[in-house]
Amino acid sequence: MQHNIPFKGAEPSDKDLTAGMKELGYSAKDVMAFYLLRSIPVWRNQGVLDQSSFGERAAGHLEYWQRRAGVPETEMLSFQGFMGWFEKHNTTGKTLLKIDNNDIHPTISSDANYFQKLHHNLDPIRERHIDTVIAKSFTEHDRVLVVYGDGHLVKSQFVFQKMFGEPGRTLQLT
């Protein structure tokens, strides 16, 4: 920022994620519920996952998601609705607050649970958006630095090979 170098975030908006998932047959409630579920391991790692305050924290998360995604009031998911959604789709054998990243990681294998399949369907929406932002940045600037998790590179390597050709290793010392 001090050198007027533009920065672009590449995550799609909650509104775009919800719309993309609707095209795949998921409701706004499914997306809201999944993002709340995905927060549980994060909150546990941060030391703020507390059973006595979880309902209040969860309700706040759902309201926040609704506003950011522009979900109509008629499609709002209440905390009780979330609990019903979890019970309906949970085949992990775990209680809600024991869910961890392995229970929700994206996979489509034959033994994948509902949460894993949902996440698997969500990932391409995110990756397409990220790749589009990166590609557009190259049309607007001479040089672009991309910083993100290496899981994205694995998912997008063929897109980048198509855009830039086969990768080569170049070390530039300045």
Image (cartoon, grey):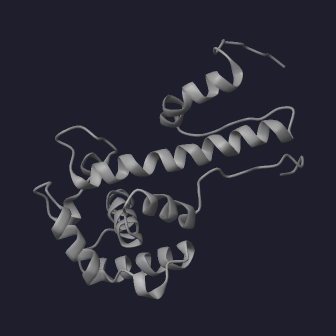
Tell which of 121 and 83 is nearer to you. Answer: 121
Residue at 49% in and 29% down? 154
Please give left or right for residue 95 compared with residue 140 in the image: left
Q: Is residue 172 placed above or below 97 in the rendered structure?
A: above
Please give left or right for residue 41 compared with residue 125 in the image: left
Residue at 45% in and 47% down? 123
Tell which of 62 and 147 is nearer to you. Answer: 62
Q: Is residue 50 placed above or below 1 in the rendered structure?
A: below
Please give left or right for residue 18 compared with residue 34 in the image: right
Tell which of 135 and 153 is nearer to you. Answer: 135
Residue at 39% in and 49% down? 121
Toward the bottom, the furthest residue is 73
**How many labels were placed on the picture?**
0
The image quarter in which residue 132 lies: top right
Q: Is residue 170 placed above or below 112 in the rendered structure?
A: above
Q: Which quadrant would the C terminus be assigned to in this image?
A: top right
Toward the left, the furthest residue is 93
Tell which of 2 and 119 is nearer to you. Answer: 119
Q: Is residue 47 placed above or below 152 in the rendered structure?
A: below
Residue at 41% in and 77% down? 62
The image quarter in which residue 112 lies: top left
In the image, residue 64 lies at what x, y percent? 50, 77
